[in-house]
Amino acid sequence: MRFFCAHCCSFGPEMPAVQLLLLACLVWDVGARTAQLRKANDRNGRCQYTFSVASPNESSCPEQGQAMSVIHNLQRDSSTQRLDLEATKARLSSLESLIHQLSLDQAARPQETQDGLQRELGTLKQERDQLEAQTRELETAYSNLLQDKSVLEEEKKRLRQENEHLARRLESSSQEVARLRRGQCPQTRDTARDVPLGSREVSTWNLDTLAFQELKSELTEVPASRILKESASGHLRSGEGTNGCGELVWVGEPLTLRTAETITGKYGVWMRDPKPTYPYTQETTWRIDTVGTDVRQVYEYDLISQFMQGYPSKVHVLPRPLESTGAVVYAGSLYFQGAESRTVIRYELNTETVKTEKEIPGAGYHGQFPYSWGGYTDIDMAVDESGLWVIYSTDEAKGAIVLSKLNPENLELEQTWETNIRKQSVANAFIICGTLYTVSSYSSADATVNFAYDTGTGISKTLTIPFKNRYKYSSMIDYNPLEKKLFAWDNLNMVTYDIRLSKM
C-alpha cells in the first residue's frame, strides 16, 4: 500500500496542517524504500506536486484521526528538539564565553609572567650589586692586610737584624772580657810629648800584629782647674782664632725646641744650613720624620718661630726615599743616603732636583754596620768647619768607623781615614774641626762623649765628657759649625746643646 502526499505550489488557509503533513511525509519517507515525485498542472492550471512513499509497516493508509495523532507526535518531537536546540545553543554560548575568557587569560598571562620575571630579575640584580660591593670591601680589606703584613715583615726583618747585631756584639764583648781577664791588653806607644799637660791620650793600634778589637784606652783627664782658668781668662773658648776651631771639652744641658706630634717622629733628623745660599737664611730649618719604610717628606720652615710652632712653609717630596737619620743640609743642598743602598744623593732644595748621586765604595748599608741603637744608621753624613763628611764602615775595616771627606759638588771622595773605633759600640758620632767624636749611649740619661779621632794626627783617645740624653732615645746628633751647637733628636724631641772648645 502506498501513501500519497500532495502539495501544490500555492497553499490555502490550511497551510500549517499541510506543512505538518508534508513533514510527516518526509519523515516517513526516511524509512521508505522508494519515493516518487510527480509534478503536473491541475484543472485550474496550478502546478501540483505529488509524492508517493511506500509505508514500511502499514499495508493501508491510516485514518484521519491516526494522521492527527502522528502530527501531534511530530509536534512534540519538534518541541523537544527545539528545547534541545535551545539548550545546545545555551551550552554553545557558555562555551563561547568560556573560550573568550580563556583567550583573555592567555592574552593576560604573558604580561603577568613578564612582570614576575622582571621583578625576579630586579631582585637578582640587587643581590649581584650587593655581592659586588661585598667583594670590593673584601678586596680592600685584603689589600690593607697585605700592606700591614708588608710593614710588619719589614719591622720583623729590622728587629731580626738588630737582634743579630746585638748577638754579635754580645759575643764580641764576651770575647773581649775573656781576653781582658787573661791580661792580653795591647800595648800603646808613648805619646806623652804630644799630649797637653794634665792629660793622657791613647796611641793608635798596631793592626799589623794584633787582631782587630774595640778601642780600649785610658781616659783623657782634663783638670777642672784648667777649664776654669781658660774660661776666666778668655782664652781657649769657642769662637777664638781664625775659624773658632778647638778641642771639645764641654757639652751643656739639652734645650728642647720642638716635640713631634705623632709616632712617626719617634726618631728623625732636623738641621740648618751652616753655609746658607739664597733664598735660604741662617734661620731656615728642615725636618724629616724617619719612622717608616718610604720616607720622602722634608718639611721646610723659613723662620725658627715657624719651626717651633710646627707650621712648615713648604714640604719637599724626594724623588727617592731616604734611609735613617744621617741626612745634612749644606750650601743649599740636602745630602742623604738612598734607601737600601750605599748611594749618597745630593738634592738641591731650591730647584727640587737631584744634582748628583754617588756610591760609597764598600760601605755597609741597611743594617750591616749601624750605630748601637740600630735604625739602619750605616751611613751618616756630617758637616764641620772644613766641609762635608761621611761616616760609615766596611767589611775591610771589620766594622771600624771609616771617615771620608767629600766634594760637595760631585760627591767624590777626597780623602779617607780608617779609625780603630768600632761603629756598633757607639750610639752616634759627629765631627768638629776635623775631629770625630762619639757618644757612648743613646738611652742612658748620663752618657758621655767617649772617643775622639783626630784626622790631622790619626790618633784616637778616650774622653769622659758628660752628655745628657734627657728623653733617653737619641737617634741623631750633628754639629752645626755656624751656630757652634749640637743638634739632636731625642725620643720625639728636637734639642740643641751648647758646647765649649779649647785650643787643639
Image (tube, rainbow, N blue to C red):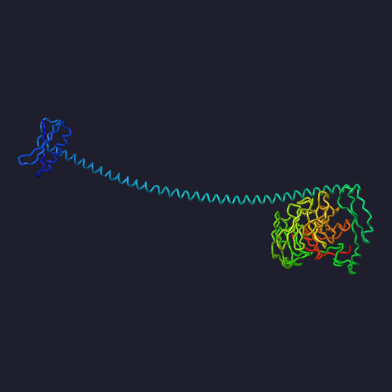
- Residue 348 at x, y percent in the picture: 73, 61
Q: Taking 210 as reference, is 157 left or right? A: left
- Could you tell me how many numbered marks the image carries? 0
Which corner quadrant of the image does residue 78 belong to? Answer: top left
Which corner quadrant of the image does residue 298 belong to? Answer: bottom right
- Residues 278 and 129: in front is 278
Q: Taking 307 as reference, is 47 left or right? A: left
- Residue depicted at 75% across the width and 63% down the height: 332
Query: For the view shown, which residue lies furthest in the bottom direction?
Result: 233
Q: Is any atom of residue 406 visible in this view? A: yes
- Residue 139 at x, y percent in the picture: 60, 50
Give the position of the C terminus as an image quadrant: bottom right
- Residue 374 at x, y percent in the picture: 77, 53
**Compared to 84, does 438 lie above or below?**
below
Which corner quadrant of the image does residue 285 belong to? Answer: bottom right
- Residue 343 at x, y percent in the picture: 75, 54
**Compared to 304, does 77 lie above or below?**
above
- Residues 90 and 500: in front is 500
- Residue depicted at 62% across the width and 51% down the height: 141
Q: Taking 141 as reference, is 396 left or right? A: right
- Residue depicted at 76% across the width and 49% down the height: 161
Give the position of the N terminus as an image quadrant: top left
Q: Is any atom of residue 267 visible in this view? A: no
**Compared to 469, does 23 lie above or below?**
above
